[in-house]
Image: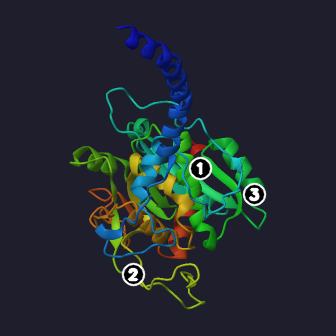
Amino acid sequence: MCRWRMVATFLTPTFVVFFFTLLSQQPSDIQLSREKRETLRKPILPTNYTKNPYNISHPYDINFEELLIMKDSGQEIPLTPLNAHPFKYILNPSNVCNDPPPKNGSLFVLILIKSAPDNFHLRQTLRMSMEKNPIEQDYVRIVFLMGTSKKEHNKNVLIENALYGDIVQQNFVDSYKNLTIKTVMGYNWAVQHCSNATHILYKDDDFHFNVKNLLKFLTNHDHPQSMLVGYRVDKAPVMRHPASPHFVRKEDYINKTYPPYLAGGAYVVSMDVAKRFVVAFPFVKYIAVDDSYLGIVAMKLNILPQMNSDLFSFKDCKDLDSKVIACRGYTSHKEVFSAWKMYVKRVLSKFYI
C-alpha cells in the first residue's frame, strides 16, 4: 500500500503537467468557430452544364445555382466581376412602388419599358393606354428606362419626368450597343426599388399592351412563380458581319449560336427570376444584343424560357382587345406619325370640353 502511495505521489505532478500541456494545445471555441467559418466560405462552384446541352461557359464555367446559394447565405463570392457598371442615376423614381396594390389582389405588376430620350410621343401613347384602364392601374406600375441623348433632348426628359415621375435614367449614352446596359439597369432598379412586384412585363416603347389580358394570364397560370415567358427564339445564329446591328465579335462571344432566348420586344418575367438575374449579371460577360444576353444568363441559371406566341405578337395588334398581352404597335414611320396626331388631337380636345 505504501508502495502505491509513493507511485501516486510521484506521478501526480507529472500527470498534472501533461494534462495542462495537452489542454493548452487544444483550439479554443473561438478558434474552432473561426475555422468552421473559413471552411464554409470555401467556394464549391463546379461546372453546371451536365444538364445543359449548349455547354456555353462564357467565360465562367461554374455552377451558378451554387453561386445563388452563396449569395443568399451571405458568403463571399470568390469570383472577379466581369462587367463594370459605374453609371449613376440621373432620374430615379424610387417611390413608384411604395403604394401597394389592393389587399384582395395577389398580383402586382411592374412594366419596364425601354425607351429613347426623343420618343416622347410613344411614351405618351402608352400613358394614355393606361388611362383607359383605371381599375387595372391599381395592380400595375410603369417606368420608362433610358440613358442620355447626344442631342438636345435631356432637358426635355427632365421636364417630362417632373410632370409624370416615371423615368429611370442613368448617365450612359442611349444607343443600340448599350441596350444590354439599359436592360441590366432596369432589372437592378426593379429588384432594388420595386421588389414587392410579383411580375415584370419588359417591353419596347413601340409595343402596345393590354393590362387586363396580362392579369388574366397570370391569374390563370398554373405556376405564376419562376416564370420567363414570351416569344422564344431557338438556335439563333450569332451575327459576325460588322454591318449587322446585331454584330458580336468572337472575342466577346465565341459560340456560333445562342441558347434559347425571348425576343426582347415584350415578355413576362416573375420577380424571383429577376432577382436571380441580378445576382448573375456581374459574372456573365456582356454582349451588345440584350435579348440574346438574357438567354445566356437564363441558361447559366438553368432557366428555360417558355414559348407563348399567342400572347406576344410581333406582326400586328389585331388581337390586342381579345387575348394578346403585347404586340408591336408601329411597323412604319406612318403609324408612328398617326399615333402622334392622335395624341395631339386628344390633348387639344381637353381644352375645348
Q: Which mark is residue 347?
A: 1
Residue closest to the far top: 2
- Quarter containing the C terminus: top right
Which of marks 3 and 2 precedes in the sequence?
A: 3
Q: Where is residue 286? Give x, y as percent.
A: 57, 69
Q: Which mark is residue 128?
A: none
Give the SS element for disc 2: loop
Which of marks 3 and 1 precedes in the sequence?
A: 3
Cα–Cα gap, marks 2 and 1: 43 Å
Front disc: 2 or 3: 2
Reply above or below: 175 against 192: below
Q: Is residue 47 visible?
A: yes
What crowding class fits label 3: few (fewer than 14 Cα within 10 Å), some (14-19), or many (20 or more)? some
Give the side of residue 200 with respect to residue 339, left or right.
left
Give the SS element for disc 3: helix
Q: Is residue 115 visible?
A: no
Q: Where is residue 122? Give x, y as percent.
A: 56, 60
Front disc: 2 or 1: 2
Q: Which residue is mark 3?
A: 154
What crowding class fits label 2: few (fewer than 14 Cα within 10 Å), some (14-19), or many (20 or more)? few
Task: Give the amino acid type for the residue marked by disc 1 in the picture.
Answer: Val
Task: Give the amino acid type for the residue marked by disc 2 in the picture.
Answer: Ala
Cα–Cα gap, marks 2 and 3: 36 Å
Q: Which residue is mark 2?
A: 236
Give the SS element for disc 1: helix
Which of marks 1 and 2 precedes in the sequence?
A: 2
